Image: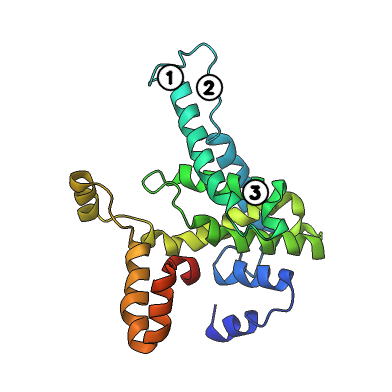
Amino acid sequence: MSLSDVLVYTRVKSACDRLGAWRHVWGVLSRGAPHGALQESRDQYVRLVREHKCVPDTEDDPLSQQSSWASYFADAELCKMINLDLQRTYPEDDFFQSPAAQADMLEVLFLWAKLHPEISYRQGMNELLAPIVWVCSQAAAQDPSTLYDEKFIRHDSFALFQALMGVMEQFYSLSDESKKTHELVGAVQPPLKLLGDRIQKKLLKQVDGKLATHLNQLGVDPPLYMM
């Protein structure tokens, strides 16, 4: 996509326009055959959900670390951790506190974490996903056609989130050196936290020292507004 195309797509007036812009700019859909690519993306999502849904064997020993129950309990802990963040996602907004929106976000975040076990789920990913789910939901409400069908909010949100994380993943990954340090001394600051601290405590201080001091005094965590 050319720069002029991007500039045109950024002049959005509705959720449908915004969703269409995101799909093309992030390479989720081609402009030539959007319906075919969209169906393929949605079918792939269904397959992935089925593959990563753990159903324990009732004949297995629940106390054995080698049984299917171990994976089941690990998945339950992962969902619990994600749900804690979802409860804190825009708590003043009825949409994000609705059971439907939280269920959509939980499944998308859980699936991404299962597909990327080296990173899994990290705090802040819910904030990245939130506007995607909101736009997909609003687009479905504005135009219930195949392109924006509400039955596929999770499918379409996952495709966009997957594309976004292709860029943002680096900020949640620990380098090999950081992993070694983590093993030796314990917790290590994630790259996103280190980047945020550098921007707020060093770069912002150079541009607007008063604002930087104010944010530091309030204890505002940089990633909260950077994302």
In the image, residue 33 lies at what x, y percent? Answer: 67, 64
What quarter of the picture does the N terminus occupy?
bottom right
Q: Residues within 10 Å of mark 1 (few under 14, many from 20)?
A: some
In-front residue for pair 37/51? 51
Tell me whether circle 2 and circle 1 mark residues in contact (CB < 8 Å). yes
**Badge 3 element:** helix
Q: Quarter-wise, where is residue 15 in the image? A: bottom right
**Relative to residue 26, is residue 67 drawn left or right?**
left
Tell me if I can see residue 44 in this picture: no
First in sequence: mark 2 or mark 1? 2
Whole-angstrom CA distance, mark 1 to mark 3, is: 30 Å
Looking at the rendered structure, the kind of residue marked 2 is Pro
Tell me whether circle 1 and circle 3 mark residues in contact (CB < 8 Å). no
Mark linked to residue 92: none
First in sequence: mark 2 or mark 3? 2
In the image, residue 122 lies at what x, y percent? Answer: 44, 51
Residue bearing mark 1: 67
**Badge 2 element:** loop
In-front residue for pair 35/68? 68
Looking at the rendered structure, the kind of residue marked 1 is Ser
Looking at the rendered structure, the kind of residue marked 3 is Gln
85 w.r.t. 20: above or below:
above
Who's the residue at 63% across and 73% down the image? 21
Whole-angstrom CA distance, mark 2 to mark 1, is: 8 Å
Tell me if I can see residue 59 in this picture: yes
**Badge 1 element:** loop
In the image, residue 208 lies at what x, y percent? Answer: 39, 87
Whole-angstrom CA distance, mark 2 to mark 3, is: 25 Å
Who's the residue at 52% across and 45% down the image? 82
12 w.r.t. 195: above or below:
below
Residue bearing mark 3: 102
Residue bearing mark 2: 56
